[in-house]
Amino acid sequence: LYRRARRWIEGTLAVFFGFAGLKLLLIRI
């Protein structure tokens, strides 16, 4: 259960940071 939750949290953070990075790139261009 802990591993699954940890994986889900990591996935959510990855998507969140991915969106943030995409926004920064779009703003820079």
Image (cartoon, rainbow, N blue to C red):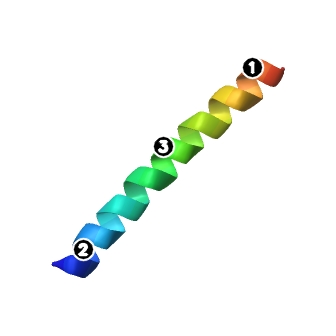
Give the mark nearer the N terminus: 1 vs 2. Answer: 2
Near mark 1 (Cα within 10 A), the count class, few <14, some 14-19 or many ≥20, is few
Which amino acid does the dot numbered 2 rest on? Arg
Mark 1 in CB contact with mark 2 (< 8 angstroms): no
Q: Secondary structure at mark 1?
A: helix
Which amino acid does the dot numbered 3 rest on? Phe
Residue at image point 64% right, 27% down: 23
Which amino acid does the dot numbered 1 rest on? Ile
| Position of residue 5 measured from the top left corner of the image (x, y, whole percent) | 24, 68
In whole angstroms, how far apart are the C-alphas of marks 3 and 1? 17 Å
| Position of residue 12 measured from the top left corner of the image (x, y, whole percent) | 39, 52
The vertical placement of 3 against 9, above or below, is below
Residue at image point 32% right, 71% down: 6
User: Which label number is shown at residue 27?
Assistant: 1
Read off the residue under disc 2.
4
| Position of residue 19 measured from the top left corner of the image (x, y, whole percent) | 55, 36
Q: Quadrant of residue 18?
A: top right
User: Which label number is shown at residue 16?
Assistant: 3
Q: In this rendered view, identify the residue nearer to me: 26 or 2.
A: 2
